[in-house]
Amino acid sequence: MSDETNKDSSAANDQAESAEIKNEQSKAEQSKEELNAEIEAELLDEIEAEQEEQQPVSEHLLEQVAKANDQVLRVQAEMQNVRRRAERDVESAHKFALDKFAADLLPVVDNLERALAAIDAADEGQKSVAEGLELTLKSFVEVLARYKIEAIDPAGQPFDAELHQAVSILPNPDLEANTVMDVFQKGYTLNGRLVRPAMVVVSQG
C-alpha cells in the first residue's frame, strides 16, 4: 500500500508541475503577444510620424517643381516672342531700308514729269528734248518699280484718306461725291507702305 500511495502522490505532483509549466508557458506566450503588439503599435506610430514629417517636405518640393516648370514655360514663351519680334524687325528693315531714300528721289520724278508736260509736242525743235525726257523718266520709273516703289495715280477713283491727301473739294454734278477729280501730285508706296500720299482734288457731288 505504501508503494502505491507514493506512486499516486508522485503522479499527482507530476501533473501539478505539468499544469504549472503549461500555465507558465501560456502566461509567457500571452506576455510575448502583448509585447509584440506593443512593439508593433510603437513602430506604426513612428512610421506615421515620419510620414507626417515627410509629407510637407514632399508637397513643398512639388510646389517648387511646379513653379520651376512655370518659369521655364514663361521664359520659353518670352524667347519665342523676342525671336519673332527680331525677325519682324529684320524683315521690316530689309523691306523699308529705302524709305527715306525713295522719298528723296520722288521730287526728281515729279520734276521730270512737269518738264515733259511743259514741252510743246507740236514744236519740232523740242521733240528730241521730249524724247530724252521720256526715256529718262521711263528708266527712272523702272528702277523704282524694281525696288517695289509704286506710284499712286487715283484719278477717277474713290477718295481714300489712307492714301490720298485732299488739297481741294469742288462741286461736280457729273461725279459721285468723294471722287478724285484731278491729281496734283502722284503718291508712292514702298512694299505696300505709304511713302507719300497723292495730292488730289475731290468732288463734292
Image (cartoon, rainbow, N blue to C red):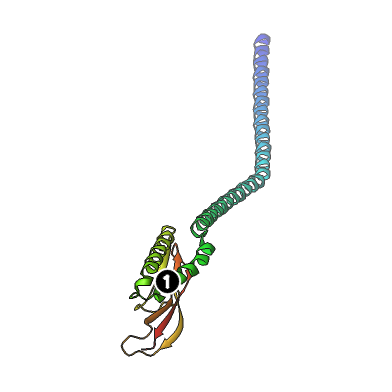
Report the side of 178 relative to 195 (left or right): left
Q: Residue furthest left?
A: 174
Q: Secondary structure at mark 1?
A: helix
Quadrant of the drawing holding the N terminus:
top right
Q: Position of residue 99 (x, y in %)?
A: 51, 63
The amino acid type of the residue labelled 1 equals: Glu
Q: Nearer the viewer, residue 68 or 111?
A: 111
Q: Relative to 193, does residue 5 appear above or below in the rendering?
A: above
- Quarter assignment of residue 113: bottom left
What residue does disc 1 label? 113
Q: Relative to 67, does residue 15 appear above or below in the rendering?
A: above
**Which residue does the image show at 43% across and 74% down from the upper left?**
114
- Counting every numbered tag in the picture gives 1
**Which residue does the image show at 64% across and 24% down from the upper left?**
22
Q: Position of residue 28 (x, y in %)?
A: 68, 27
Q: Residue furthest front?
A: 125
Q: Nearer the viewer, residue 94 or 119?
A: 119
Q: How many neighbours does mark 1 have within 10 angstroms: few (below 14), some (14-19), or many (20 or more)?
A: some
Quadrant of the drawing holding the C terminus:
bottom left
Report the side of 83 relative to 6 (left or right): left
Q: Position of residue 81 (x, y in %)?
A: 54, 55
